[in-house]
Image: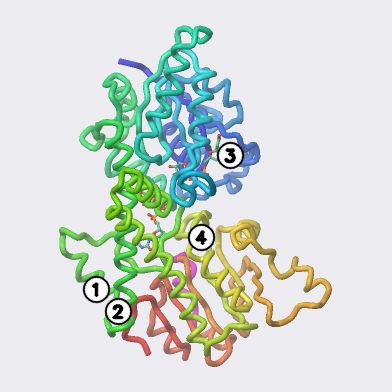
Amino acid sequence: MIKINNICCIGAGYVGGPTMAVIADKCPNINVNVVDIDEERIKKWNDKNLKNLPIFEPGLAEIVDRCRDINLHFSISVEEKIYEADMVFISVNTPTKKKGLGAGKASDLRWVEESARQVAKFSSGHTIVVEKSTLPVRTAEVIQNILRSAEQDNHRRGISFDVLSNPEFLAEGTAIEDLEYPDRVLIGGDNINAMNALHSIYSRWVSKEKILFTNIWSSELAKLTANAFLAQRISSINSIAAMCEATGADVREVSRAIGTDSRIGSKFLDSGPGFGGSCFKKDILNLVYLAEYFGLNEVANFWQSVVNLNNWHQNRISKLVVKKLFGTVTGKKIVVLGFAFKANTNDTRESAAIQICKDLIDEGADIWIHDPKVSKLQIEKDLEMAPIEQLEEIKENKLLSKIGKWRFSKSLDIFDKAHAVLMLTEWKEYKNIDWIDISKKMMNPAWVFDARSITDPSKVESANLNLWRVGDGTSK
Ligand code: UDX
Ligand code: UDX
């Protein structure tokens, strides 16, 4: 039985950070080192003030507080920590390629390849390399090839490797809970000793029947498939939301009705502003790319349509806002509640809010954005535009009222003279908004656009506000 004493994880991101924190917490006798090339990020992981951790996840700060500098360490000492490790997790990002072969669809594997090269160069003895990043099928082959050449290198005598695939199924916002109580842990590989070594880590807190062994390619494909199926459900229900609005049905009632069918199940049937997050789109596009590569064009088209529907749905929401506000939003104040791609995270990657806000700014709107966890700087990066107070035209007093603009507010005292409120993230602080009070401050007539079904329609309507809710064909 291979005994694991030292783990190194390359990549201190939304996946690597929480996953390693939970492993350290559950396995006090294993020393866990999380390394990253991003010095700023590592500084934040080591910040004494736990509010400054680079990632917001409920329950994460408590674990970091318990384990940090005991058996959980964050550093930029990539080479040294690889050298010391018996097991190296690769958890670096794999964004969609921007140029070259497969641009716009295939994953850019340069960081994974670079990580494998670092392991090949700096490891000692036997090392089990674990793919944690979600990767296109057969990526393990790339890693294996790099490691095999190191094994055959005369200058690197005595080193050897095994490669496993161990995709992470955590969802942001519930990462700690998902890691502590996973539906399953998937371990793909071809060497039973290495697989057992990883099994022995998870089995400290996960029951044995939930730890599944597969071959390495099934494991890689299962992860892409899980994300594709989940995203497909959201596009399906969002397509039905548009049908509901057209026919007088209510998507919440339809979801409830179909969700009680045990074959369908009730989860992932909430219509919203369109799925976001770093994985769904990227993973489906990967599947599309792979299908095209293998000449399976119908398969590629099928999955591509899930992404197309999502894009269309986001665009439909911004168009609808313009239409309801008498065909123009130029110069109109619109309060946007929520910028994160879902509640309980500060992550904005692929958030529906990005495209919707950009569209409204293009139409000339004056957008006031609130989010409890996302920073102004992050929003600026996502919108690729400075907030109003930094615009040169404003400084020079030359701003034309026709120019679309945005600003950020930490407080919720932002409804004065607003023409509309657009709810894009389901943060709990938005659930108890006092609409009667707010309606007194807003313009008349004013609109509430609820893309997350978090308002109580009777309360909004009794405040004399017009309400649009996603998939609600019953409202006027
Ligand atoms: C990412 C992918 O999005 C996901 O598909 C995959 O499953 C795991 O990696 P995430 O953890 O959310 O998920 O990414 P991110 O928060 O960007 O973290 C990746 C980290 O890797 C970054 O901190 C980056 O600095 C680091 N990195 C990248 C390295 O340490 N070395 C590299 O060579 C490249
Ligand atoms: C997803 C997968 O759930 C997770 O297993 C995988 O490891 C990574 O990708 P994540 O992207 O963090 O996790 O969040 P998730 O909860 O899946 O939500 C993704 C998007 O779908 C969000 O924008 C969310 O708001 C949206 N969504 C989710 C809906 O619109 N309706 C739903 O019913 C569920």
- The image shows residue 315 at horizontal and vertical percentages of 46, 72
Decide which of tag 3 and tag 4 comes sooner along the chain. 3
Main SS category, magenta section:
loop
Identified by mark 3, the residue type is Trp
Identified by mark 4, the residue type is Ala
1 or 3: mark nearer the eye: 1
Q: Quadrant of ligand 2?
A: bottom left
Q: Is residue 431 magenta?
A: yes
Decide which of tag 1 and tag 3 comes sooner along the chain. 3
Vertical position of residue 197 compared to residue 173: above or below: above
Horizontally, residue 63 falls left or right of residue 178, namely right
2 or 3: mark nearer the eye: 2
Identified by mark 2, the residue type is Cys
Q: Residues within 10 Å of mark 3 (few under 14, many from 20)?
A: many
- The image shows residue 5 at horizontal and vertical percentages of 43, 19
4 or 2: mark nearer the eye: 2
The residue depicted at 28 percent of the width and 24 percent of the height is 190
Front residue (pair 468, 311): 311
Q: Which mark identifies residue 244?
A: 2
- The image shows residue 43 at horizontal and vertical percentages of 64, 38
Decide which of tag 2 and tag 3 comes sooner along the chain. 3
Vertical position of residue 226 compared to residue 475: above or below: above
Name the residue tied to disc 3: 45
The answer to whether any part of residue 68 appears in the image is yes
The answer to whether any part of residue 61 appears in the image is no
